[in-house]
Image (cartoon, rainbow, N blue to C red):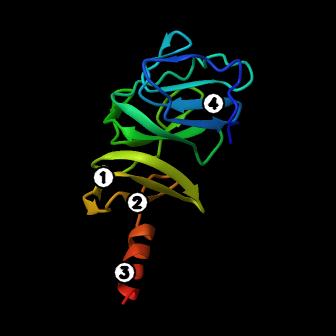
Amino acid sequence: MPSEVPSAVTPAVTGDNVQSIAAVGSRMVIGGPFTAVAGVGRDSLAAFDAVSGALWAGFAPTVDGTVLSVLPGPVADTVYVGGKFTAINGTTVRNLALLSTVNGSLVAGFKVPTINGQVNDLELRGGRLFVAGVFTKVGGVNRGGLATFNASTGAADPFLGVMLTERHNNSG
């Protein structure tokens, strides 16, 4: 968990603000509607060394929208990114992806069904990726702003939908 006290070596962010920050190994990954970090063009997503503050040159993914949430991935050197975008590195992904923090590439094998609106928050618990946001459907199935996914594959997980249905049915 990042410290609440900023470091003197944290790189300057320009263009707007940072919406989310995650410690991934020795790197800090940031997402938000910014346009540059440490004077280098980085649209909405960047990584820097946690000790020196140096921008991580190998992590320069192109995002066609805004990243609103970042979260360490299920294995070392990976990060989940959620927000309002339709492509990363020219590949179609809808509002949620898993990236390598080494080179910014999409992690092979992580495929998320279409999410029809923005992702605002991410949480990893018990092998499930919990996702909250301003969406109504995941893969064409009603989800009302909450969904769960297999943390490693990105497959939609019926856990949350089943849990909410059972709660509704048992409430009287």
User: From the viewer's perspective, is the residue at label 2 or at label 3 nearer?
Assistant: 3
How dense is the environment of label 2, judged by Cα within 10 Å: few (below 14), some, or many (20 and up)?
many
Front residue (pair 80, 15): 15
**Distance between the alpha carbons at the discs numbered 1 and 2:** 10 Å
**Distance between the alpha carbons at the discs numbered 2 and 4:** 26 Å
Q: Earlier in the sequence, mark 2 or mark 3?
A: 2
Q: Is residue 55 above or below residue 91?
A: above
**Residue at disc 3, secondary structure:** helix
Task: Tell me, for residue 114, which label it has, or none.
Answer: none
Residue labelled with disc 4: 28
**Distance between the alpha carbons at the discs numbered 1 and 3:** 20 Å
Q: Earlier in the sequence, mark 3 or mark 4?
A: 4
Residue placed at 54% from the left, 53% from the top?
A: 123
Which amino acid type corresponds to the residue marked 4 in the rendered image?
Answer: Met
Asked whether disc 1 touches disc 3, contact meaning CB atoms under 8 Å apart, the reply is no
**Quadrant in which the C terminus is drawn:** bottom left
Residue labelled with disc 3: 168
Which amino acid type corresponds to the residue marked 3 in the rendered image?
Answer: His
Which amino acid type corresponds to the residue marked 1 in the rendered image?
Answer: Phe
- State the image quarter where residue 76 is shown: top right
